[in-house]
Amino acid sequence: MKQIFIKYSLQFLMLLFVNLTIAQTISIADSLNQEPIPYATVSFGNGLGNFADEEGKFSFSKEKYSDVDTLFISAMGYAEKAVLTTSLPETILLKPEVSQLSEVVVSAPKNGKFKLRKRKPISHTDIFTSWLPTVESEVAILFKRYEGKPSQISKILLPINAESKYKSKGKGKFATIFRINFYENQKGLPGDPTGYENVVFSINEKEDKVFELDLSSKTIYIPENGIFISLQVLGYANSKGKLAQTKQYREIKTARGVQKISTSFRPLLPFTNQLVSQKTYVRRIFLNNKKWQIFDKSYNEKSKLIQTGHRNYGMGAEFKVYEN
């Protein structure tokens, strides 16, 4: 009788362990039409977080994140929603907030003669003067109209460092999913999102130095006071090219206890010391209330990039420039 009791007790404990370790898959959708919301932000409220995939789905394991009691779900154009991890539903519905999206005033002609002009990107292969992107990082640069004339952005030219020179040291294949976002220029700072749709794409180890993102079909015109373009890391892609649900931090044992360090993603972003007058803004969307900060000593005076003058990301662009 005792052996039977022990047998069933072990089976129960094994089932309990399996249930605890299985991650729950949750969908995020629009409350009005139940359409999935791709790449919604899932913040854990303690400086950590993740993104839903292109189908609006993400996984959460209570065992993996035992210290997380609330998830904060947000997406551009929707009201943020807090959900307790003890009672996670299969689907989380977000309410649209149309007022969050600013109207884009276009004064450039959609048809007519134009000339292609370019703002050259600045790239390099030095990993020691490159930014280590994390899943929470976003880098924004201000773009103004080319010589003050009506300008459409046809391409974004993204400096990248795929570490091709260091592959012999264990660097292998990867594919990282990024998102381009567009923000108003509010007194020299990235402000509210514009009405332009964000652009999601991936970069792999085959790309190096400069990645060209074609936006010619998006009809993105630069307002009179300029537009901020940001590059945001969403995470690695899986074998099917979709956003992988991976652990976004490493646990490091220190004298002060276990510290959670955000996982960095490749490719690296080469920062430059050649753009003295340009200002680069960065933010970590799971920290500091999503506040944008200029990348200088006020952001982190101990940063080696800042100490060596590598304070700017040399993002470039190609423009269709129309005559006034």
Image (cartoon, rainbow, N blue to C red):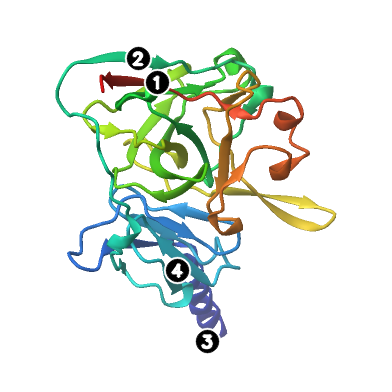
Q: Up-down: is 118 above or below 136?
A: above
**Among the two numbered marks 2 and 3 on one chain, the one whose residue lies closer to the N terminus:** 3
Which residue is label 2 attached to? 117
| Inter-mark Cα distance, 1 to 4 | 61 Å
| Inter-mark Cα distance, 1 to 3 | 88 Å
Residue visible at 57% across and 85% down in the picture = 2
**Farthest front residue in view:** 324
Check disc 2 and report its element: helix, strand or loop: strand
Q: Where is residue 38 in the image (x, y as percent from the top left)?
A: 31, 51
The quadrant of the picture occupied by the C terminus is top left
| Inter-mark Cα distance, 4 to 2 | 58 Å
Residue 237 visible in the snapshot: no
Q: In which quarter of the image is residue 226?
A: top left
**Among the two numbered marks 4 and 2 on one chain, the one whose residue lies closer to the N terminus:** 4
Which residue is label 3 attached to? 1
**Among the two numbered marks 1 and 4 on one chain, the one whose residue lies closer to the N terminus:** 4
Residue 87 visible in the snapshot: yes
Which residue is label 4 attached to? 19
Check disc 1 and report its element: helix, strand or loop: helix
Check disc 3 and report its element: helix, strand or loop: loop
Residue visible at 17% across and 29% down in the picture = 110
Amino acid, disc 3: Met
Front: mark 1 or 2: 1
Q: Are marks 1 and 2 in contact (CB under 8 Å)?
A: yes
The residue closer to the viewer here, 142 or 161, is 142
